[in-house]
Amino acid sequence: MIYQLASLQQFLVAELSPHCATLQKKRFGDVTLEDLAVHPGSFGGVYAFYGQNNECLYVGKTSSRGLPERIGAHLDPREHAYMNHFLKKLIRANYAENLHAALEYALSCRLCLFTFSTEERASRQNCQNAEEFFRKVLAPLLNPLPSGLDGNMLVRVHLPCC
């Protein structure tokens, strides 16, 4: 469920999305604080939520907040919550009718984390770059970015900071 970004650098850009689809993910409702906090390299990075058919739904990042705080904030069902973007996007895309139904759906999704190996590498700018890269490559259904990437280039060309 948790992978170092550096472990992906040998892949071609075109190989990354199919590779990520094969990675082990954990059901969001089964993720524990221990999963998010007690491992080397939990300094920040990119996370992806996958749907029930293993399709990438959403890609996000965390840099200034710890993984437990940022990932957990996605589950806040209050209407005026600040960081529950995933739940709100599920509603806008008709996966759920309200925040509580979106929360139930989110808990059934699977989570995959890509973290930096050191706190210094997990800077705000590096996390932003990694998130943009993954949104282009994984094409999440709820927050994609146009790719424009050469699929024959190595991932390390786009993510040299890892």
Image (tube, grey):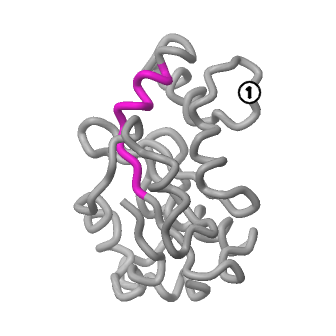
SS class, disc 1: loop
Measured as percent of width and height from the top left, residue 156 is found at: 48, 87
Numbered range of the magenta stretch: 102-112
Give the side of residue 115 with respect to residue 127, left or right. Answer: left
Q: Which residue is at 31% across, 53% downward?
A: 25
Q: How many labels does the image show?
A: 1
Estimate the x, y position of residue 50 in percent, counting from the top left. Answer: 36, 45
Residue 63 spot, x, y in % from top left? 70, 63
Position of residue 33 measured from the top left corner of the image (x, y, whole percent) = 52, 49
State yes or no: residue 70 in magenta: no
Query: Residue at the location (44% across, 31% down)?
Result: 106
Q: Which corner quadrant holds the N terminus?
A: bottom left
| Residue found 53% across the figure and 21% down from its top | 91
Give the residue at x 49% y 45%: 58
Q: Magenta span has 103?
A: yes
Main secondary structure along the magenta-highlighted residues: helix
Q: Nearer the viewer, residue 109 or 65?
A: 65
The residue identified by callout 1 is: 81
Amino acid type, residue under disc 1 in the picture = Ala
The quadrant the C terminus occupies is bottom right
